[in-house]
Image (spheres, helix red, strand yellow):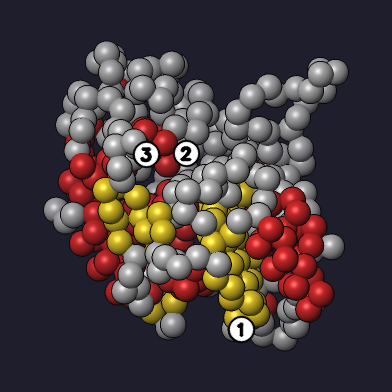
């Protein structure tokens, strides 16, 4: 897979460090003792999680589940934009199968006319642009700038990757998810379900039902997904995703527009600026900080969803942490991260 050669060296270095840490952590257990989370930190993290309306919390480290708490009755719930990181892996599997090429226009897979009033720029939007959030589209799928020149966290545009996967594979999203991920990871409850219209309506000309789907899952099944990421595509001796180039790019800064973003994954070892609102404070100082979560290890990579739903992967600590909020809970983005990591990682 070809990566663009216009990468900013500093951003690339940050991404390479995360990828290197993942690789090192896979073999780190050979001879290097992993520093465990403290019991007091774990207890405080549980207390904080309960206070922030957490529905389920699972903390796993180095082969052991250290804490698993449930404060909701539902066996599964919509995991919001954690699903994006699942789709990133599914696209990677499609790439290794030769079904998808990241440098191919989206139109080649799903046909023309999926954006609004955009006949000129639409053919230039590549699969890679949807993975990187650099399509140049607005939320209503009108063109705001040339593809590859603007970074914008665009969920309506992202959803069209589901159409790409279905078109390229000839399978429904549920079928390919179960075959490519569910079966090797041991999933029995995770599935794609149609969201209520009040929760999400597809934007743009296409109204395919799959565009309005949410992935429902639980912490136990997401743990196997996180362990697979920790072990660079392997799970229980099976290869789930074998394309090393894609895996590396997925968890690396591959574009200069947003240092803290790979292919639908968030990276903690890079500068981070707010997604919404003002970019400066009242004194004109930049709100950009040196990491997404200052209190967490810098090698952390994360799948993040609304309601502060989180899947954290920590290579250096050989850990996976899943936090799902109670259904219906929606606090301002990022409110959970700081108190949780201050308690767990003092």
Return the residue nearer the eye: 4 or 59.
Answer: 59
Separation of residues labelled 2 and 1 (CA atoms): 34 Å
Within-10-Å neighbours for mark 3: few <14, some 14–19, many 20+: few
Circles 3 and 1, Cβ within 8 Å, touching? The answer is no
Compared with 151, 72 (above or below) is: below
Q: Which residue is mark 3?
A: 199
Answer whether residue 233 is visible to the viewer in this image: no
- Please give the name of the residue rendered at 41% of the width and 36% of the height, measured from the top-left corner: 155
Mark closer to the chain start, 2 or 3: 2
Q: Which corner quadrant of the image does residue 183 belong to? A: bottom left
Q: Which residue is mark 2?
A: 132
Within-10-Å neighbours for mark 1: few <14, some 14–19, many 20+: few
| Residue 55 image offset from top left, x and y in percent | 54, 62
User: Residue 78 vs residue 46: left or right?
Assistant: left
Separation of residues labelled 3 and 1 (CA atoms): 36 Å
Q: Which mark, by number, is residue 205?
A: none
Mark closer to the chain start, 3 or 1: 1
From the image, state whether disc 3 or disc 1 is nearer to you.
3
Q: Secondary structure at mark 2?
A: helix
Q: Secondary structure at mark 1?
A: strand
User: Residue 43 vs residue 29: left or right?
Assistant: right
Compared with 150, 235 (above or below) is: below
- Tell me the quarter of the image containing the C terminus: bottom right
Mark closer to the chain start, 2 or 1: 1
Within-10-Å neighbours for mark 2: few <14, some 14–19, many 20+: many
Compared with 93, 201 (above or below) is: above
Answer whether residue 345 is visible to the viewer in this image: yes
Q: Which residue is mark 1?
A: 64
| Residue 44 image offset from top left, x and y in percent | 77, 68
Q: Secondary structure at mark 3?
A: loop
| Residue 19 image offset from top left, x and y in percent | 60, 58
């Amino acid at each position: 897979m070809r990566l663009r050669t216009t990468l900013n060296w500093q951003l690339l270095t940050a991404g390479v460090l995360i990828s290197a840490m993942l690789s090192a952590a896979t073999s780190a257990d050979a001879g290097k003792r992993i520093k465990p989370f403290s019991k007091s930190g774990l207890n405080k993290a549980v207390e904080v999680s309960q206070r922030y309306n957490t529905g389920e919390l699972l903390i796993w480290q180095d082969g052991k589940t250290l804490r698993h708490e449930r404060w909701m009755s539902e066996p599964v719930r919509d995991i919001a934009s954690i699903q994006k990181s699942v789709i990133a892996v599914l696209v990677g599997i499609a790439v290794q199968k030769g079904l998808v090429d990241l440098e191919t226009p989206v139109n080649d897979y799903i046909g023309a006319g999926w954006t609004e009033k955009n006949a000129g720029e639409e053919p230039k939007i590549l699969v890679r642009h949807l993975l990187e959030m650099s399509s140049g589209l607005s939320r209503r799928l009108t063109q705001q700038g040339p593809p590859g020149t603007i970074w914008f966290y665009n969920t309506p545009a992202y959803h069209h990757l589901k159409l790409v996967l279905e078109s390229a594979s000839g399978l429904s999203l549920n079928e390919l998810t179960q075959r490519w991920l569910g079966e090797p990871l041991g999933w029995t409850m995770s599935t794609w379900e149609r969201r209520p219209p009040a929760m999400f309506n597809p934007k743009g000309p296409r109204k395919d039902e799959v565009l309005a789907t949410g992935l429902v899952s639980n912490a136990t099944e997401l743990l196997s997904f996180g362990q697979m990421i920790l072990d660079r595509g392997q799970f229980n001796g099976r290869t789930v995703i074998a394309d090393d180039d894609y895996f590396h790019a997925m968890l690396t800064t591959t574009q200069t527009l947003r240092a803290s973003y790979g292919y639908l994954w968030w990276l903690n070892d890079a500068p981070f600026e707010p997604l919404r609102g003002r970019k400066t404070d009242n004194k004109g100082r930049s709100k950009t900080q040196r990491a997404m979560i200052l209190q967490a290890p810098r090698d952390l990579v994360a799948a993040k969803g609304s309601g502060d739903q989180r899947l954290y992967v920590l290579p250096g600590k050989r850990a996976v942490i899943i936090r799902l909020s109670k259904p219906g809970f929606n606090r301002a983005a990022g409110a959970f991260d700081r108190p949780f990591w201050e308690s767990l990682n003092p």
